[in-house]
Amino acid sequence: MSAIASAASLPFFVPLSAAFICLTVFFAAVFRDPPRKIGSGIVSPADGTVREIDPEKGLVSIYLALRNVHVTRAPFDATIVKAVRVRGKHKPAFSKSTPSNERVEIDLRTTIGDMSIVQMTGAIARRIVLYVKEGQPLAKGEKLSLIRFGSRVDLRLPPEQVQILVQKGQKLYAGKTCIAEVRDGTLD
Protein backbone atom coordinates (compact mmCIF):
# COMPACT_ATOMS: atom_id res chain seq x y z
CA MET A 1 0.00 0.00 0.00
CA SER A 2 1.41 3.38 -0.91
CA ALA A 3 2.07 6.07 1.68
CA ILE A 4 -0.64 8.28 0.19
CA ALA A 5 -3.23 5.53 0.43
CA SER A 6 -2.16 4.82 4.02
CA ALA A 7 -2.50 8.47 4.96
CA ALA A 8 -5.88 8.68 3.28
CA SER A 9 -7.14 5.73 5.31
CA LEU A 10 -6.11 7.28 8.64
CA PRO A 11 -8.75 9.14 10.57
CA PHE A 12 -8.82 12.83 9.67
CA PHE A 13 -7.56 13.95 13.07
CA VAL A 14 -4.22 12.10 12.85
CA PRO A 15 -2.75 14.10 9.91
CA LEU A 16 -4.34 17.26 11.31
CA SER A 17 -2.74 16.59 14.71
CA ALA A 18 0.63 16.00 13.06
CA ALA A 19 0.30 19.31 11.21
CA PHE A 20 -0.50 21.17 14.44
CA ILE A 21 2.46 19.55 16.22
CA CYS A 22 4.79 20.61 13.39
CA LEU A 23 3.38 24.14 13.47
CA THR A 24 3.82 24.32 17.26
CA VAL A 25 7.45 23.19 17.01
CA PHE A 26 8.06 25.74 14.24
CA PHE A 27 6.62 28.64 16.30
CA ALA A 28 8.52 27.54 19.41
CA ALA A 29 11.76 27.62 17.42
CA VAL A 30 11.05 31.01 15.79
CA PHE A 31 9.82 32.79 18.94
CA ARG A 32 12.37 31.38 21.37
CA ASP A 33 14.06 33.71 23.85
CA PRO A 34 17.16 31.99 25.27
CA PRO A 35 18.95 33.53 28.25
CA ARG A 36 21.99 35.58 27.29
CA LYS A 37 25.18 36.45 29.13
CA ILE A 38 25.61 40.13 28.23
CA GLY A 39 28.88 40.88 26.41
CA SER A 40 31.33 43.74 26.80
CA GLY A 41 31.41 46.99 24.83
CA ILE A 42 28.49 47.96 22.63
CA VAL A 43 26.57 44.77 21.94
CA SER A 44 24.49 43.72 18.97
CA PRO A 45 20.80 44.64 19.26
CA ALA A 46 19.77 41.58 17.21
CA ASP A 47 20.73 38.06 16.23
CA GLY A 48 21.57 37.78 12.55
CA THR A 49 24.18 38.49 9.91
CA VAL A 50 25.90 41.81 9.29
CA ARG A 51 24.63 42.96 5.89
CA GLU A 52 26.22 46.42 5.75
CA ILE A 53 28.69 48.56 7.70
CA ASP A 54 29.44 52.26 7.30
CA PRO A 55 31.98 53.40 9.93
CA GLU A 56 31.71 57.05 8.82
CA LYS A 57 27.98 57.06 9.61
CA GLY A 58 28.30 54.67 12.55
CA LEU A 59 25.93 52.23 10.80
CA VAL A 60 25.68 48.49 11.39
CA SER A 61 22.83 46.80 9.48
CA ILE A 62 21.75 43.30 10.53
CA TYR A 63 19.59 40.81 8.60
CA LEU A 64 17.55 38.40 10.74
CA ALA A 65 16.71 35.14 9.00
CA LEU A 66 13.84 32.94 10.09
CA ARG A 67 16.22 30.72 12.12
CA ASN A 68 17.52 33.63 14.25
CA VAL A 69 16.15 34.65 17.66
CA HIS A 70 13.85 37.64 17.04
CA VAL A 71 14.02 39.32 20.45
CA THR A 72 15.99 42.57 20.15
CA ARG A 73 18.04 44.07 22.98
CA ALA A 74 19.55 47.40 24.06
CA PRO A 75 23.12 47.75 22.76
CA PHE A 76 24.26 50.00 25.64
CA ASP A 77 22.91 51.54 28.84
CA ALA A 78 20.49 54.21 27.61
CA THR A 79 17.27 56.12 28.03
CA ILE A 80 14.60 55.92 25.34
CA VAL A 81 14.04 59.38 23.88
CA LYS A 82 11.58 58.30 21.19
CA ALA A 83 9.90 55.08 20.09
CA VAL A 84 7.72 55.50 17.00
CA ARG A 85 5.94 53.00 14.76
CA VAL A 86 5.95 54.00 11.06
CA ARG A 87 3.52 52.25 8.73
CA GLY A 88 4.89 51.06 5.40
CA LYS A 89 5.30 48.27 2.91
CA HIS A 90 6.31 44.64 3.46
CA LYS A 91 9.10 44.02 0.94
CA PRO A 92 11.82 41.39 1.59
CA ALA A 93 14.04 42.41 4.53
CA PHE A 94 17.25 41.90 2.54
CA SER A 95 16.24 44.22 -0.35
CA LYS A 96 17.37 47.80 -0.92
CA SER A 97 13.77 49.02 -0.59
CA THR A 98 13.48 47.79 3.03
CA PRO A 99 13.64 51.36 4.48
CA SER A 100 10.15 51.93 3.00
CA ASN A 101 8.83 48.95 5.01
CA GLU A 102 6.84 49.16 8.22
CA ARG A 103 9.30 49.87 11.01
CA VAL A 104 9.86 50.97 14.59
CA GLU A 105 12.37 53.77 15.15
CA ILE A 106 13.92 53.99 18.61
CA ASP A 107 16.16 56.91 19.61
CA LEU A 108 18.44 56.34 22.60
CA ARG A 109 20.41 58.77 24.75
CA THR A 110 23.62 57.29 26.19
CA THR A 111 26.69 58.54 28.04
CA ILE A 112 28.68 58.48 24.77
CA GLY A 113 26.06 60.19 22.59
CA ASP A 114 22.82 59.46 20.80
CA MET A 115 22.11 56.10 19.13
CA SER A 116 19.18 54.94 17.05
CA ILE A 117 17.75 51.54 16.25
CA VAL A 118 15.46 51.03 13.28
CA GLN A 119 13.66 47.69 13.24
CA MET A 120 12.09 46.88 9.86
CA THR A 121 9.58 44.21 8.95
CA GLY A 122 10.04 41.99 5.92
CA ALA A 123 7.79 40.21 3.44
CA ILE A 124 6.70 37.68 6.06
CA ALA A 125 7.29 39.73 9.22
CA ARG A 126 4.24 41.90 9.71
CA ARG A 127 4.51 43.05 13.29
CA ILE A 128 7.01 44.39 15.78
CA VAL A 129 5.92 44.04 19.42
CA LEU A 130 7.58 46.84 21.41
CA TYR A 131 8.42 46.07 25.06
CA VAL A 132 9.59 49.60 25.95
CA LYS A 133 8.25 53.16 26.05
CA GLU A 134 9.58 56.71 25.79
CA GLY A 135 11.46 57.94 28.85
CA GLN A 136 12.30 54.43 30.03
CA PRO A 137 15.87 53.76 31.20
CA LEU A 138 17.43 50.59 29.80
CA ALA A 139 20.33 48.46 30.91
CA LYS A 140 22.62 47.05 28.23
CA GLY A 141 21.13 43.78 26.99
CA GLU A 142 17.60 44.57 28.21
CA LYS A 143 14.83 43.43 25.85
CA LEU A 144 13.47 46.03 23.40
CA SER A 145 11.02 44.13 21.20
CA LEU A 146 10.00 41.00 19.39
CA ILE A 147 10.06 41.09 15.59
CA ARG A 148 7.81 38.42 14.20
CA PHE A 149 9.66 36.35 11.55
CA GLY A 150 12.51 37.59 9.27
CA SER A 151 13.47 41.25 9.32
CA ARG A 152 16.24 43.83 9.48
CA VAL A 153 17.70 45.98 12.27
CA ASP A 154 19.85 49.05 11.61
CA LEU A 155 21.92 50.47 14.48
CA ARG A 156 23.39 53.97 14.23
CA LEU A 157 26.15 54.78 16.69
CA PRO A 158 27.92 58.11 17.29
CA PRO A 159 30.81 57.56 14.77
CA GLU A 160 33.23 59.94 16.49
CA GLN A 161 32.83 58.05 19.79
CA VAL A 162 33.03 54.41 18.67
CA GLN A 163 35.11 51.98 16.67
CA ILE A 164 33.05 49.34 14.87
CA LEU A 165 34.60 45.88 15.25
CA VAL A 166 32.34 43.60 13.17
CA GLN A 167 32.64 42.71 9.50
CA LYS A 168 30.12 42.19 6.71
CA GLY A 169 28.81 38.60 6.77
CA GLN A 170 29.65 38.08 10.46
CA LYS A 171 27.09 36.23 12.64
CA LEU A 172 25.86 38.23 15.64
CA TYR A 173 24.00 37.40 18.85
CA ALA A 174 21.79 40.01 20.54
CA GLY A 175 23.18 41.27 23.83
CA LYS A 176 26.22 39.01 23.52
CA THR A 177 28.38 39.94 20.51
CA CYS A 178 30.50 43.08 20.94
CA ILE A 179 29.99 45.11 17.76
CA ALA A 180 31.85 48.28 18.77
CA GLU A 181 34.09 49.76 21.44
CA VAL A 182 34.11 53.25 22.87
CA ARG A 183 37.14 55.08 21.42
CA ASP A 184 38.44 56.40 24.75
CA GLY A 185 38.97 52.77 25.82
CA THR A 186 36.29 52.61 28.51
CA LEU A 187 33.99 49.65 28.12
CA ASP A 188 30.60 49.30 29.73
Image: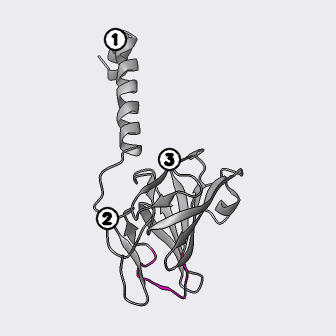
* Badge 3 or badge 1: first in the primary sequence: 1
Residue type highlighted by circle 2:
Ile
Front: mark 3 or 2: 2
Residue type highlighted by circle 3:
Phe
* Element under disc 2: loop
Is 144 drawn above or below residue 9 in the view shown?
below
- Whether 166 is among the magenta residues is yes
Range covered by the magenta-colored residues = 157-168
Give x and y (percent) for residue 149.
50, 47
What residue is shown at x 39% (from left), y 38% (from top)?
A: 26
Residue linked to disc 1: 10
Q: CA distance from mark 2 to mark 1?
A: 50 Å
Q: Nearer the viewer, residue 123 or 172?
A: 172
What residue is shown at x 43% (from left), y 84% (from top)?
A: 182
Residue type highlighted by circle 1:
Leu
Front: mark 2 or 1: 2
Tally the numbered discs.
3
Residue linked to disc 2: 38
* Badge 3 or badge 2: first in the primary sequence: 2
What residue is shown at x 35% (from left), y 80% (from top)?
A: 187
Is 85 drawn above or below residue 62 in the view shown?
above
Circle 3 residues within 10 Å: few <14, some 14–19, many ≥20: many
Residue linked to disc 3: 149
Relative to residue 7, is residue 135 drawn left or right?
A: right
Name the disc covering residue 171, or none.
Answer: none
